[in-house]
């Protein structure tokens, strides 16, 4: 399907296929750091082979992806996709190349995505929105019956897809998606300008929050949290954060389950939590919500140069934490 945009440029919208790996990788390379963060929930310098497999090997039923290509250059300028999360329900996502913002690409892509969702029996989108984005929330609530679910710093809106999609409210909704306002992610501003949740003087429970991703550094953090919890008779919350891939969530859920099981064998009271988002923000959000007295996190293996440029999870946790933080290095 070829479309002429208001500025006269032309794009072709078609389903993503496995042969589009190189095209998506090249398009990703043209995105700004903020656009990458909005799309993938955390800083991502490049797309791994695993991500490219997931993004291009879609079944066009439970997982649909539509690609917008510049007719003149052949460059990928935008991608919209939905992933079915339950009967009749899917989560939408869209990204548009920075130099194509404001030209109508996102609107056309999302309109086509809604058509495809309806064709595949999907009647509701679940759209995470930044809690402070009142304009987007108001637009969605005017669209139809909407239910809110609060998760950390996000509000997830359950939106019944309208039968008619050409009204003014829907056009505004499409515009919000096109500019990234409804991207299911957190603002890059939170990385470069940290905001602490809670206060160090708040009343705290005897609870230790520990982050894990299955790495050696994370395992050392879990061991340290266990030793402290045994000594202080504290409960432990084992937390993992994933970005975009559903398989990644399942894998991390297994990591959390194994870590929690090992802690329970030591007689500890343990809770498990797997959330989507940036690991540092997830850990500090959980600590704030649960009024924990300590966060334990692995030091990570990022080199000095990378830490100077973009920091580390441990650095970010220390800046944002509402409670004490213990940074653990694996024993040599």
Image (tube, grey):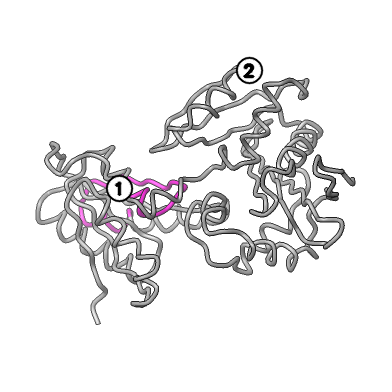
Q: Is residue 152 above or below residue 39?
A: above
Name the quadrant of the C terminus: bottom left
Horizontal side of residue 259 vs 170, given as left or right: left
User: Circle 1 sits on which residue?
Assistant: 284
Residue furthest front in the image:
7
* Residue 258, quarter of the rendered image: bottom left
* Residue 73, quarter of the rendered image: bottom right
Please give the name of the residue rendered at 29% of the width and 55% of the height, measured from the top-left corner.
317
Horizontal side of residue 251 vs 26, given as left or right: left
In magenta, the rendered stretch is: 260-284
Name the quadrant of the N terminus: top right
Q: Are marks 1 and 2 in contact (CB under 8 Å)?
A: no
Percent x, y of residue 232:
10, 52
Camera-nearest residue between 291 and 47: 47
Camera-nearest residue between 169 and 140: 169
Percent x, y of residue 264:
27, 52
Magenta span includes 75: no
User: Circle 2 sits on which residue?
Assistant: 144
Q: Residues within 10 Å of mark 1 (few under 14, many from 20)?
A: many
């Amino acid at each position: 399907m070829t479309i002429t945009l208001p500025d006269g440029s032309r794009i072709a919208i078609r389903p993503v296929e496995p042969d589009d790996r190189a095209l998506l990788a090249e398009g990703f390379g043209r995105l700004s750091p903020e656009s990458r963060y909005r799309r993938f929930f955390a800083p991502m310098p490049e797309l791994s082979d695993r991500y490219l497999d997931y993004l291009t090997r879609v079944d066009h039923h439970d997982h649909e992806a539509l690609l917008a290509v510049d007719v003149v250059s052949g460059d990928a300028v935008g991608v919209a996709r939905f992933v079915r999360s339950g009967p009749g329900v899917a989560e939408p996502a869209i990204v548009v190349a920075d130099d194509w913002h404001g030209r109508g690409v996102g609107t056309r892509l999302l309109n086509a995505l809604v058509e495809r969702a309806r064709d595949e029996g999907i009647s509701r989108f679940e759209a995470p929105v930044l809690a402070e984005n009142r304009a987007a929330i108001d637009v969605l609530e005017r669209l139809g019956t909407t239910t809110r679910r609060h998760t950390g710093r996000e509000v997830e809106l359950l939106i019944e897809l309208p039968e008619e999609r050409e009204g003014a409210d829907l056009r505004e909704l499409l515009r919000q998606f096109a500019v990234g306002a409804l991207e299911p992610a957190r603002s890059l501003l939170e990385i470069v300008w940290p905001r602490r949740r809670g206060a160090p003087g708040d009343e705290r429970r005897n609870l230790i929050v520990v982050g894990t991703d299955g790495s050696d550094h994370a395992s050392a953090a879990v061991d340290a949290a266990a030793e402290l919890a045994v000594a202080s008779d504290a409960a432990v919350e084992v937390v993992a954060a994933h970005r975009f891939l559903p398989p990644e969530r399942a894998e991390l859920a297994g990591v959390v389950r194994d870590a929690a099981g090992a802690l329970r064998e030591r007689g500890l009271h343990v809770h498990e939590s797997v959330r989507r988002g940036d690991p540092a923000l997830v850990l500090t959000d959980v600590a704030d919500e649960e009024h924990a007295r300590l966060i334990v996190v692995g030091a990570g293996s990022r080199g000095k140069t990378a830490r100077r440029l973009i920091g580390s999870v441990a650095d970010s946790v220390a800046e944002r934490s509402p409670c004490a933080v213990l940074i653990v290095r694996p024993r040599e």
